[in-house]
Image (tube, rainbow, N blue to C red):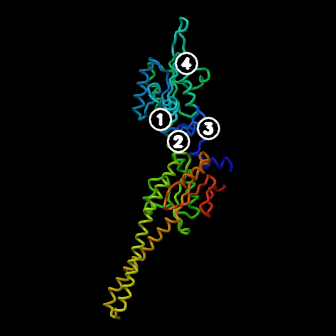
Amino acid sequence: MSMDRFYRYTRGFLHFPEMQQPTQFREIAKCFVRKDHPCGKFLGASKSCFVACPNIKEIKIMLQLITEKLTKIGIESIIAIEQRAYGQDIFCTKICGKIIESQFCLVILDDTIEPINGATANIPNPNVYYEYGLMTALGKHVIPLQKDGQDLAFNIQTHDTIKYTPDNLSAELDRALKDATKITEEYRAGYQREELMSQRLFVRSIEINGYKKKDYNWFLDDDINDTVFTGFGHPERRECLFFSLANNRELLRSCLTDMQVIIKRLESDHDEFSKQVDSLDKEIKAQKKEEEQRKQLLTEEKTRMRPYLAYERSIDTKIEKRADRTSKLELIQNGKFAIVLTPEVIELRPKVLEEYEKMNNRLTLPLYIGDISGINIGDLSISFDLPNI
């Protein structure tokens, strides 16, 4: 597959470091610092602003002002030096995890003033600069501030930094927070639109191959409307399909959980429809027997034919109802799950199949897993190629 085609399909829900934008909703699978240590945090998952700052008394009033302004615009302020994480990994819980989940970040690059050999020296805070680097690497929108008259470290002197004073601090914060909120929220909205359009491509390919997307009147809608799956029916193949796209571990977990929930609901539907079919069979059989007896008693008189005709229509209604329930039973029995995995999680395919096989269900529905190039559902091969124009 060409990179151009790959990007066209995955734009909006696949993420490469060189394509990172602020506030992407993607999962960080592994820790940046500790080898093989799982993370599981999601970029931009909360409406919060992580504030990195040195632990000095001089900025206490400044932090109060920042918190007040963030609260007014509906953003939670996360100030690491004020957080507690008893019995937990401080770096993961108080710093890295909060930066990952934040909508945007703010960093105060004020130096610590320390006496050295009878004089005073400006000492940059290494922790703050480390956190600043982490924000940048994650593609976060960052608001950097430094007290006017102090110098930035040489490697960030080209970064646009607010040089604040007591007189301009409030106005500068208002402007910067307004810009940060607008930029990150616009990106969130754009990302969600692109993700929906990307999923739309897969759904269209499935529809082209004969599956029809079901609306809210579908008899199985209540079984799937609160899950990550979309329902399809195939009239010619007499089967229903439950489809989902998964581009991170969290969605895969939801897929596995929802599949088990759907199957339990389908088992209940199957039992109910089976009882109805059995009951209708008995009623129709008894009514047909009674019908034969009535025929023997009927004469050619029209007046005596009327109740018989009404009785015949009653049988037809029950036969139609039985055919409807039998058809629904067939659809349930021919049900299938289909999941498309993106390159970020394609290596988890064996694990997903293994976990699905562990489920103890009376009703066994096959699970088909494809990738962004296509999927095989039974003997039907569905390609996700776009037309060449």
**From mark 4 to mark 3, how far is it between C-alphas?**
29 Å
Which residue extends farthest top?
118
Sooner in the amino-acid sequence: mark 4 or mark 3 = 3
Sooner in the amino-acid sequence: mark 2 or mark 1 = 2
| Of labels 3 and 1, the one closer to you | 3
For numbered disc 1, what is the local secondary structure?
A: helix
Q: Is residue 123 above or below residue 301?
A: above
The C terminus, quarter of image: bottom right
Q: Which mark is residue 25?
A: 2
For numbered disc 3, what is the local secondary structure?
A: helix
Q: Which mark is residue 181?
A: 1
For numbered disc 4, what is the local secondary structure?
A: loop
Residue 73 position in % (x across, y down): 41, 34
Residue 26 position in % (x across, y down): 54, 42
Sooner in the amino-acid sequence: mark 1 or mark 4 = 4
Q: Is residue 326 above or below residue 188?
A: below
Q: Is residue 304 left or right of residue 35?
A: left
Residue for badge 3: 17
Write the residue at 52% across / 61% down. 364
**From mark 1 to mark 4, how far is it between C-alphas?**
28 Å
Instruction: Give the quadrant of residue 289.
Output: bottom left
Residue for badge 4: 124
Identify the amino acid type marked 4: Pro
How packed mark 2 is, by other alpha carbons closer than 10 Å (few <14, some 14-19, many 20 or more), is many
